[in-house]
Amino acid sequence: MAVDVSGATAASHEAPLERARRAAEAFGTVAVAGLLLLSFGLTSSVFLEPANLRNILVQITVVGVAAIGETLVLLVGGLDLSVGANVLLGSVVAGDLVQRHGAPLWVGIAGGVLASTGIGLLNGVLTAVIGIEAILATLGTFLLAGGIAKIVLHSSWIVVDDPFFGNLVRTHVFWQLPVMVIVLFALYAVAAAVMRMTPFGRAVYAIGGNPRAARIAGLPAVRIRIVAFALAGAFAGVAGLLQIGQLGIVSSGNAAGLEFQAITAALIGGLSVSAGGVGRVERTLLGALIVGMIANYQTIRGIPPNYQQALLGGILLLAILTDRLFRGRS
Amino acid sequence: MRARLDKRYLDAWFLAGMTVVAVVAFRFVEPSWLNRNTLQSIVTQNGPLAIVAMAMTFSIISRHIDLSPGAMLALAGVVIGLVYRDTGSLALGLLAGLGLCVATGLVNGVLVSGLGLNAIMVTLATYIWARGLALGFTNGNPIVVDTRLTAITNHTFGGFTIVAPIVVAVFVIGWLVLSKTLFGRYTHAMGGDPVGARRAGIRVGLYTTLIFVVMGVATWLASTIVVGQLASAQPYAAPSLELDAIIAVIIGGSRLAGGEGSVGRTLLGVAFISILNSGLLNLGLTDAYYQVYKGAALLAVLSAQLLLRRLAAEEVRRRQDAEQLLAEARVYA
């Protein structure tokens, strides 16, 4: 919006409106999620059944975990298109090590997460050190990671029967929630705490919000950017492990287009592609939940998956529009 | 002056060199790739990419990346196919496709320029919904469009199809518009300094919307060619056309941040990507190795170009400093 030159009088006028806007911004996503829950519950007899609600949580776990990383990258002012391919790479490496090479479980897990973290690290170096725009660099690594994953797969698939992965879905912790959902919530809790309470979190917001000021203030911008991208890779690797648990099989079609689902979840949660340093990690979980609820409701209603994708595009557009209404023109 | 100009084009010379290297390398690995028809088939296969990349040059110079063309190409093709199948009229189908592309460009343009939304986000939504509709309308199955269009599109003279003159015409028009008209100058101005452009009285909203509509028309033209070539509308067509087009424009040397770019650079970028695609596909690689080689080649070229550009900028600065010192010395002498 235009710079306010009239000063204090206008500011005092603006105050209640400004406060209302901030409240709407903070609770807008929560309100939308609540409204959807209510209207879906009223119009469908099965939607609110505990089994279905648990089902939604299981369905959003992989995207949700990958979206934590996407959120970090968006916060630091970047964009990561390699997430989907990177999730695939993590699951392929883990599955290949455990199933085809008979490696111990921990080697498979570490290998999968490390491979994905490596791609994330490469993203960080390409963008922060060499200076390639994030959208182009991560497009290149999207091709790389996807290609490497398919090479390791040998144009085949891997059925993973190690009980560890199956137990991620089958073992219930409490309220009959499976382990992977608990992992989802735990990771969000840790990420939210880190972003709020640690110097790293504050540095991410500072660098994403105003890179020049952050550099002048002496923040290690390059290092923080690299770490943010590497962490995004690590989260993608963990999401890959969870996906093995969910599907029990690793094939080249897994996680296709997942980056766009993660970006959509983050945007619905209130993040911005154009400006870093705005938004909260935990709201991305809400964004993922909203997308998950809508997808689930559409499935209950019998809408074919292709049209569900079309509607997802519409919902994304709606989210961007709402964001503009609440936040005003930047 | 001459030397400085040369330095400024260092990255373009590098890309031209890499293009030659790619041709020689592909020729070496698979001798049959380079023959009398190689150029013809590259132009025929990559015509749609070239057309969309030309429009993408305007988008990127004006700072508004457009992610919609790939999915819109598929959707426009599906609409052409559906209308043709239901009415039996190809003209009506083509008209419906054009209407859809122009309308989508208009809506995207208004959302970006009127409401100030980020172009990547708006066109990312299009990227998702358009592909969803293309798949939904057809259940993922192609629609046969066996008409005169196919005969016209695939008719060859000297190995070239009609795609060649179309691409030439599109680039000539693009060059004329970008370098000789007010619209072209405004495109540069809006990308270089949007606020300044607005203050200078340029109707930024109008011209930004126009750029999205231009992309719509280019997408429709590319879609028509693809439908003609394949004699069918494919809902999975052009899976990453927009990304190839963006890479072509950027690798040619236009800046993603806007304000800089030229038709010649885009042409060079399209040539490189087309030869890379053609050569890699000709090796009979599996999808996996194709992806890895392409990704690695792109990242390597982008990295090298950035380093070269940094060197060039330093060189220019050093020369300016030297000239200034020389001028001061003359004053004292």
Image (tube, coloured by chain):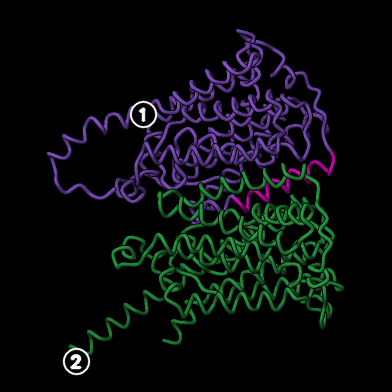
Residue picked out by circle 1: A24
Left or right, B267 with reference to A284:
right
The answer to whether residue A135 shows anywhere in this view is: yes
The answer to whether B200 is drawn above or below residue A308 in the figure is below
The answer to whether residue A224 shows anywhere in this view is: no
Of B152 and A162, nearer the camera is B152
Q: Amino acid at mark 2?
A: Ala
Residue at x 69%, y 31% (from the top left corner)? A303
Picture colour for chain A: purple
* Mark 2 Cα-neighbour bin, 10 Å: few <14, some 14–19, many ≥20: few
Left or right, B208 with reference to B157:
left
Q: Are marks 1 and 2 in contact (CB under 8 Å)?
A: no
Give the green chain's letter: B
Residue picked out by circle 2: B333
Label 1 to label 2, Cα distance in Å?
Answer: 69 Å
Q: Amino acid at mark 1?
A: Ala
The span picked out in magenta is: A139-156
Residue placed furthest toward the top: A175
* Mark 1 Cα-neighbour bin, 10 Å: few <14, some 14–19, many ≥20: some
Residue A152 on image: x %, y %: 78, 43
Of B23 and A247, nearer the camera is A247
Residue B159 on image: x %, y %: 82, 79
Residue at x 72%, y 30% (from the top left corner)? A108
